[in-house]
Amino acid sequence: MKKKAAEVHSLLAALIAKREQEIVEIEQMVERYERRLRKEEQAYRSLSPLRRMLSGKKPDHHLAVEYIHYVKKPMEKVRLLREEVGRYYAMLSGSIPADLPDTLV
């Protein structure tokens, strides 16, 4: 029984580390996108009025779709991963039973 509990604890610790790494990677991806967007906006504003007129800007609905794809959906996944990590921490502390789904075992 103790061996199984130790295996569950090590599995939970590995899952927590993996999920936290995923969270960091997603947040970095979102930050890179936001940084790129700021640079594009700054470059557009630095153009002369004639070049601005010729170069054009992405339509707002394109920006909205990009935002949903690159920011909103990934941050929703981060929220879900954080909830999952919270459940794993609760299992480690013993406040909820450490019944893992069969897919993880």
Image (tube, rainbow, N blue to C red):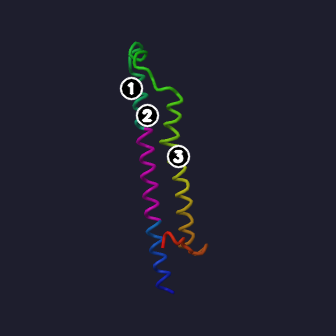
Q: Where is residue 31 drawn, in percent x and y?
A: 44, 43
Left or right of residue 51, residue 2 in this image: right
> Dot 3: what SS?
helix
Q: Quadrant of residue 33?
A: top left
- Say what amino acid the circle numbered 3 marks: Lys
- First reached walking from the N terminus: tag 1 or tag 3: 1
- The residue drawn where x is 43% and y is 62% is 18
Q: Nearer the viewer, residue 85 or 73?
A: 73
- Say what amino acid the circle numbered 1 marks: Ala
List the single residue furthest toward the bottom: 1
Q: Which residue is mark 2?
A: 37
Q: Disc 1 vs disc 3: Cβ atoms closer than 8 Å?
A: no
Q: Quadrant of residue 87?
A: bottom right
- The residue drawn where x is 49% and y is 41% is 69
Residue 31 among those drawn in magenta: yes
Q: Mark 1: few, some, or many residues within 10 Å (few <14, many ≥20)?
A: few
Q: Which residue is mark 3?
A: 73
- First reached walking from the N terminus: tag 1 or tag 2: 2
Real-space Cα distance between discs 1 and 3? 27 Å
Residue 43 - label: 1
Q: Where is residue 62 drawn, in percent x and y?
A: 50, 31
Which residues are the magenta region? 16-34
Q: Where is residue 37 drawn, in percent x and y?
A: 43, 34
Mostly what secondary structure, the magenta segment? helix
Real-space Cα distance between discs 2 and 3? 17 Å
Real-space Cα distance between discs 1 and 2? 10 Å
> Dot 1: what SS?
helix
Q: Where is residue 29 drawn, in percent x and y?
A: 42, 46
Residue 39 against residue 11 in the figure, above or below:
above
List the single residue furthest toward the right: 96
List the single residue furthest toward the top: 50
